[in-house]
Amino acid sequence: MTAKLRISDQDVLLVVDIQNDFCPEGRLAVPRGDEIVPVVNRLATRFKHVVLTQDWHPRGHLSFASTHPGRKPYDTIAASYGPQILWPDHCVQATSGAEFRKDLQIAHAQLILRKGYHPNIDSYSAFYENDRRTRTGLAGYLRERGFTRVFLAGLAFDFCVRYSSEDAKHEGFDVVVFEDACRAIDVDGSMLATRKTFNAVGIRCVSADIVG
C-alpha cells in the first residue's frame, strides 16, 4: 500500500495554465485537457496555499506562427535566445481563450502569475522566460512565503508543467508532479523526453490519490 503524502504549511500547489485555449475547442488544445479540472479542484482543497499561472500573450507575439509570413504552427525558428517552436495564436490578452476554465474552482488561490507577456520572448516556465535570464519573480515569492515543496498540476505536462518543474528543482525546491492532473501535447517525443528529464533530476511523478 502506497503511503499517503501529508501536506504542510510549507507546501504550495502550482496550477499551470488551465485556460480555455489549452482545452478542447481552444486555439492550442491539449488533448483531453478538460479532464483534469475536477482532479485539480479536488487537489486544491487539500492545499492551504495555491498559485495559478496564466499564459498572457500580446497580439503578434514572437511565438505565433501568424507573426512569421510563410511559417506554420509547429515550425521551429531561431529566436535570439535559441530554437523556438511556433504555435497557433493562443491565450491572447483580454480574450476568452486566455480566461481560466469556468469550472476551475480555486477561490482561495493566493497569487495569479501571468507569463508570456514579453512580446519577443516566449515563456513555458513559471520561473523564467525562455531566454533563461528573465525571471518572473515566482522563486522569490515562494521563498519569502517560506515554502519548501512545490506540487504541480496543469497543462501541458511536456511543456509548461515540465519547465516549471525543472526550474523549481533548479531553484532548490522539492518538486512533485501530479501526473494524472496533467495532460500532454507530445510534440516530437516531448512526453518521453519529459519523463527522462524528471527521472534524471529527481522530480517525482505521483497520482493525486496519494494526497492524505
Image (tube, helix red, strand yellow):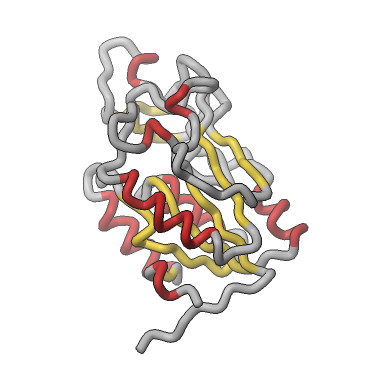
Displayed quadrant of residue 33? top left
Q: Relative to 184, is 146 above or below?
A: below
Displayed quadrant of residue 97? top left
Q: Give the left or right position of residue 57, taking residue 193 as reference.
A: right
Picture coordinates of residue 123, whole percent (x, y): 50, 37
Picture coordinates of residue 31, whole percent (x, y): 25, 43
Q: Give the left or right position of residue 35, taking residue 167 as reference.
A: left
Picture coordinates of residue 190, whole percent (x, y): 28, 49
Picture coordinates of residue 172, whole percent (x, y): 61, 65
Q: Nearer the viewer, residue 41 or 178?
A: 41
Q: Give the left or right position of residue 154, taking residue 49 as reference.
A: left
Give the residue at x 75% y 59%: 145
Give the residue at x 30% y 35%: 29
Residue that lies at the very extreme toward the bottom in this rendered image? 1
Q: Which of 98 and 175 is in front in this view?
A: 98
Q: Nearer the viewer, residue 109 or 166?
A: 109
Residue that lies at the very extreme toward the right in this rendered image? 144
Q: Give the left or right position of residue 83, taking residue 144 as reference.
A: left
Asked whether residue 120 appears in the rendered view, the answer is yes
